[in-house]
Image (tube, rainbow, N blue to C red):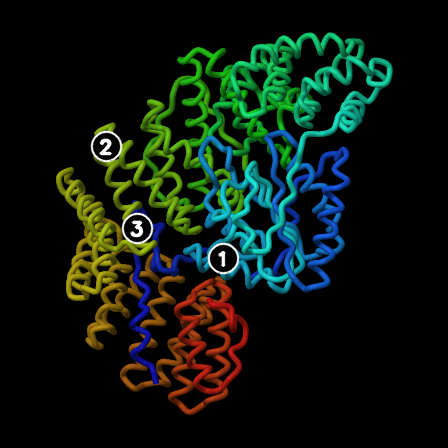
Amino acid sequence: MRGQGQSGRNELSGGVVHGPSIQASAVYGGVHFRTGDTPDRERPWQLPQPVSLTDRTDEVAYLDDLRARAVRQGHATLATVSGLGGVGKTALALAWLHRLRSDCPGGQLYADLGAQSATGPADPGEVLGGFLRGLGLQAEQVPYGIGERAALYRSLTAERRIVVLLDDAATAAQVRPLLPGGPNVTLVTSRRRMSGLALEGGRQVHLEPLAPDAALELLAATLADDRVATQSDDARALVALCAGLPLAVRIAGARLAARPRRRITTMVQALTAERGRLDALTIDGDQGVRAALDLSYQGLPSEAARLYRLLGLHPGREFGTAAGRALFGGAGTDASVGDLIDLLHDANLLIETGEDRYRFHDLVRLHAAGRAEEDEPAEQRAAAFRRFADHCVATATRAETAIDPRHPLRERSFGPGPVVTEDFGEGTQAALDWLERELHTLMAVIRRAGAAGVAEAGWQLADALGPFFIRRKHYDHWCAAYRDGLAAARELSDTAAQCRMLTSGGLGELGRGDHACALEMFELAAELFAADGDRLGHARTLNYRGLAEHRLGRLDAAAELFARAAAELPGCGDHRAGALARLNAADIALAQGRLEQADADAAGARAGLLAVDDSYNAARAMILLGRICLRRGRPGEAEERLSSALAVLREVAAHYEVARALEVLGEVAERQGRRDLARDRYQEALDLYVVVGRPVPAAEVRERLRAWGEDEGPGAGTGR
């Protein structure tokens, strides 16, 4: 019997950060929002569209042979495609992987690992989160730690037949957690040879520049006319100046294709002069690309050239038309900026990655940023970044309100001129999806805001991400955003902003397990609230401090803080937070064996939560009341209360809390001698714990079933 064991995993309630948004165990899994039924596992088709591939027959044949041997032996296929920037690594990978779609019907996963990104290589834990969501998990089902994510990823891919493309990898260590389970196919592209993946069975495919005849074939396909055939000597000179790099050939060819009457010799003369300038710079074999880029840039209309260099200031990996409008400024509309983006795309300066989504090749991005440095005055670059930061704050604030309309807002401040807000659609899911997609960019803006002279945008953007972090639980980003936001608020000497950063950031630290750091942040916020005469803010920190004290194992201190919060918050006007604090106090009282006090506090909390129409947390209080009844030896009454809570929680698809209720109901049935019913309830609880990625309670229930000699069911042997 384990009627008392539940207290080891009590789910405390954070109350609110700046309003009623953080609720039951803001940090430990009890935050709830409607998700609907758990969806069937989806089949992701994430690979970008392939471009035409010229030559590379030997490399394709090698990959085909590698795949055939792996299939015969029942092994995974792992290969690294390496070579210079612009040599066509991604083009080869995409062309070959797309051919495998019928053999690998389980889906395609793609990640840009950003070895050449201005913001540094992608974090493999973040990439794993995207892969897990692509495989059909809801965001709240994705575990926090990279080890748990990698184990779950391997489990979910072990029985599939999928392909994975890890583009622009930095190191073998970055790649290893991203390798799927089972006999699947993974290609890695990198400027490095990645010999460190040999232990994982990785093979090497090194791309050299195209041979002259192959480069001529690519140029002819790009021009789509007879100039290569009729001006063959000049064409050979042109591809030689491009050093056989497909990217350079495509860029030069696009420029000629836009001028069908221009002779190739004109391009050869211009490129020769440009190469002469670049040869002195020793740019690791990229001179051909750089020369072609300079010529292409010089041939752009003035507005397209300006947008090109301003896009070089974009801090993220991808962007859309709205971001371009913000950087461009002035009277630019979606249509006019969209036309300019089309020009850049037609000139092979942008890669289209999805509907209204674009990115630079890393060499092109470096070139665009360099042209911005040379051709755009410093004050114009600063103004463009301010416009872009304002765009991020405005759109993120709109998303914040869509996710949690009750999350109180401080008035946002913006720079001069109109602010571009992206239309991401309507509703909570659209807002969450936009923030997820843009998170890398938003974090880069927060990091750079202080140095860029827009500290206000830094803390305001962090603040707007609060409801998103509560739901998606990206704890590393959560903590980093509020750490940088706090620095920005301190730079501005804005006490209220500092308090918001400290409380929100403290909850993030609590979520990732740094309880001492969280307590320090909450205590500092309490001092600032008190000095500012903010009674409500100070009362809220009592609840936060109680959460930290409890996680540090100091139950008496936690109980005192929760009791004070429950007493003070209603008097400050926040009845819901007061009820949640009382629910926390009840949980502590149960853990300490003070059953009468626990019962009174849980019942009082439930009444308070029902009074503010919070049926979800009221159902959580009912679970606690059921646990108290079980401790008192009243299993029949416990079942009645737990069943009542279960009905509410099932209705709103609160999967984690449903699992907790079922687990306690299993204990009730076990105590009543109804072994089959107990087993069924434990099994359903285990299934749900596995689905929502909660390894600790799943392990406890699995051990109980194992002790009974029962089948472990889903999740067995996965290491979760």
Could you say which disc has been placed on residue 509 in the image? Answer: 3
Can you identify the residue that label 1 sits on? 150
Q: Are marks 2 and 3 in contact (CB under 8 Å)?
A: no
Residue 665 placement, left or right of 566: right
Residue 476 point in image, percent of width and height: 38, 47
Give, as a three-letter code, the residue at label 2: Arg
Dot 2 or dot 3: first in sequence order is 2
- Say which of 499 and 144 sits in front: 144
Give, as a three-letter code, the residue at label 1: Ala
Dot 2 or dot 1: first in sequence order is 1
Residue 690 point in image, percent of width and height: 49, 67
> Compared to 264, does 318 lie above or below?
below
Q: Residues within 10 Å of mark 1 (few under 14, many from 20)?
A: many
Query: Is residue 570 at all visible to an observer of this figure?
Result: no
Frontmost of labels 2 and 1 is 1
Mark-to-mark CA distance, 1 and 3: 22 Å
SS label for mark 2: helix
Can you identify the residue that label 2 sits on? 490
Residue 559 placement, left or right of 293: left
Residue 396 placement, left or right of 523: right
SS label for mark 1: helix
Residue 618 placement, left or right of 519: right
Query: Quarter-wise, where is residue 263 in the image?
Result: top right
Q: Residues within 10 Å of mark 3 (few under 14, many from 20)?
A: many
Residue occupying the point 62% across, 52% down? 78
> Compared to 274, does 481 lie above or below?
below
Residue occupying the point 35% across, 82% down? 637
Q: Are marks 1 and 3 in contact (CB under 8 Å)?
A: no
> Compared to 245, does 584 lie above or below?
below
